[in-house]
Image: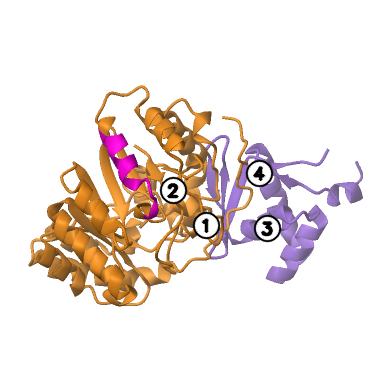
């Protein structure tokens, strides 16, 4: 189940964006062609029965003029679809209207209201009104405290899915984007628990993006999140991304790590296995000096993999970065 | 090989070995075998010197200056590190 990056263009310019190494101005603007998209759907479905999940993302996927065509093609091929969008683009409302009855989950990344123009805000709200329960909000925790009540308001006003996916802003491999440092974890963890308490009274549950180590929370905070039905788990087991020109990357923060073309692999599971094997030896480096002796890292790596891999590899020496023509 | 030649030997970090410094300490992974190591303070300093391409003599001088001890006092730790790391294939001896 890959994340297909339909375009690397975006209508926002978030300082924390961990995709910025793959997006203008770092690279040229690029849209996926219909031909590449069709090939990627074939590749995704190879050696598998129907019901495979495909994620459409960007940049901002609704900036792609063939967005609806691509979504419909994937649905015709019996893929299950999830779209990651900010739904604030000019054409997002008409696309949402056209696809509102299709079996698509919409994961909507939102920033505080003041970050949107009047038009963007209007587009977003039109989409949310149309999509209702099919839309789940996702929100990134930045180092500075920001109000979060508006998320609850949006969910209640538009009758959205009653869960919020919370991300801790992750670093890219180069660490050039705004991101949380380890020292920020305690205050952010406190804000997350506080927010989970407020959400609970609206029957809203928090789920979590990848890349946060267990030690970001105290055992007491973990317990409270569990009690609030917002159980935290730590993972780094990424769904692979495919860039508009067909290169496979482990995840956006690791866009500059390894990026073989998808045609180097027979199928998605083969690509996934290859990336896991390439990354596995580096995981013990951990993201903090405590990871080495951490029980959760040692006993069962599924409990914690040391946080974001871009953090683990940052500053590591002698890391094999490969090249675009690498043999598989 | 003369004692002088031995002291001027420059070991290299093995090609399949990756490492990282965190809070002043070095974590080393052998990406081929999957083995990984957390070095103590002195070993971390020795590792950094070896990785920087310094000779055995330069390493003991730098580490001695760092901890304000004589080169002779550094030598047993240095020899022990080199022996272990060669055995674990973390470093390679010069040709």
Q: Give the crowd class for mark 2: few <14, some 14-19, many >=20 residues within 10 Å.
A: many
Question: Which chain letter matches label 3?
Answer: B
> In the image shown, does A216 or A325 lie closer to the viewer?
A325
Colour given to chain A in the rendered image? orange
Side (left or right) of A123 relative to A276 = left
Mark 4 highlights which residue? B85
Tell us which disc is closer to us: 1 or 2. Answer: 1
Mark 2 highlights which residue? A251
CA distance separating discs 3 and 4: 13 Å
As helix, strand or loop, the secondary structure at mark 1 comes to helix
Mark 1 highlights which residue? A21
Same chain? Circles 3 and 4: yes
Instruction: Please report the residue visible at 55 percent of the width from the left and 62 percent of the height from the top.
Output: A25
A95 over A174 or under it: above or below: above
Contact between labelled residues 2 and 1, with CB atoms less than 8 Å apart: no
| Disc number for residue A121 | none
Question: Which chain letter matches label 1?
Answer: A
Quadrant housing the C terminus of chain B: top right
Question: Which chain letter matches label 2?
Answer: A
Task: Check residue A64 for magenta coloring.
Answer: yes
Same chain? Circles 3 and 2: no
Instruction: Please report the residue visible at 48 percent of the width from the left and 38 percent of the height from the top.
Output: A275
Query: Start and end of the magenta stretch?
Result: A63-75
């Amino acid at each position: 189940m890959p994340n297909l990056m339909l375009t690397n263009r975006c209508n926002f310019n978030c300082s924390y964006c961990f995709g910025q190494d793959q997006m203008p101005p770092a690279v040229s603007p690029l849209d996926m062609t219909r031909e590449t998209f069709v090939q990627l759907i074939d590749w995704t479905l190879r050696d598998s029965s129907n019901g495979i999940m495909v994620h459409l993302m960007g940049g901002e996927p609704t900036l792609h003029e063939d967005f609806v065509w691509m979504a419909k093609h994937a649905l015709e091929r019996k893929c299950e679809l999830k779209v990651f969008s900010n739904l604030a683009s000019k054409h997002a409302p008409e696309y949402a209207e056209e696809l509102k009855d299709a079996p698509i989950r919409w994961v909507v990344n939102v920033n505080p209201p003041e970050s949107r123009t009047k038009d963007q805000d209007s587009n977003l709200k039109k989409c949310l009104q149309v999509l209702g329960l099919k839309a789940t909000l996702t929100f990134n925790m930045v180092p500075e405290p920001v109000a979060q009540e508006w998320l609850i308001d949006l969910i209640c006003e538009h009758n959205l899915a009653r869960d919020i996916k919370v991300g801790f802003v992750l670093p890219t491999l180069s660490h050039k984007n705004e991101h949380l440092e380890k020292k920020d974890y305690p205050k952010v963890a406190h804000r997350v628990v506080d927010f989970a308490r407020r959400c609970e009274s609206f029957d809203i549950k928090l789920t979590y993006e990848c890349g946060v180590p267990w030690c970001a929370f105290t055992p007491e905070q973990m317990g409270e999140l569990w009690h609030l039905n917002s159980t935290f788990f730590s993972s780094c087991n990424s769904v692979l991304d495919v860039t508009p020109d067909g290169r496979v990357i482990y995840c956006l923060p690791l866009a500059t790590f390894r990026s073989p073309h998808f045609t180097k692999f027979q199928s998605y599971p083969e690509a996934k296995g290859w990336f896991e094997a390439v990354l596995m030896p580096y995981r013990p480096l951990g993201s903090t000096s405590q990871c080495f002796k951490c029980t959760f890292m040692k006993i069962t790596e599924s409990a914690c993999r040391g946080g974001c891999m871009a953090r683990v590899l940052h500053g590591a020496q002698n890391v094999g970065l490969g090249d675009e023509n690498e043999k598989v | 090989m003369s004692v002088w030649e031995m002291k001027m030997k420059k070991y290299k970090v093995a090609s399949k070995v990756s490492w990282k410094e965190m809070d002043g300490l070095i974590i080393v992974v052998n990406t081929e075998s999957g083995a990984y190591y957390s070095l103590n303070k002195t070993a971390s300093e020795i590792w950094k010197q070896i990785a920087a391409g310094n000779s055995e003599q330069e390493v003991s001088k730098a580490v001695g200056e760092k901890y304000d001890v004589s080169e002779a006092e550094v030598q047993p730790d240095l020899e022990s590190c080199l022996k272990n790391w060669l055995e674990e294939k973390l470093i390679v001896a010069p040709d």
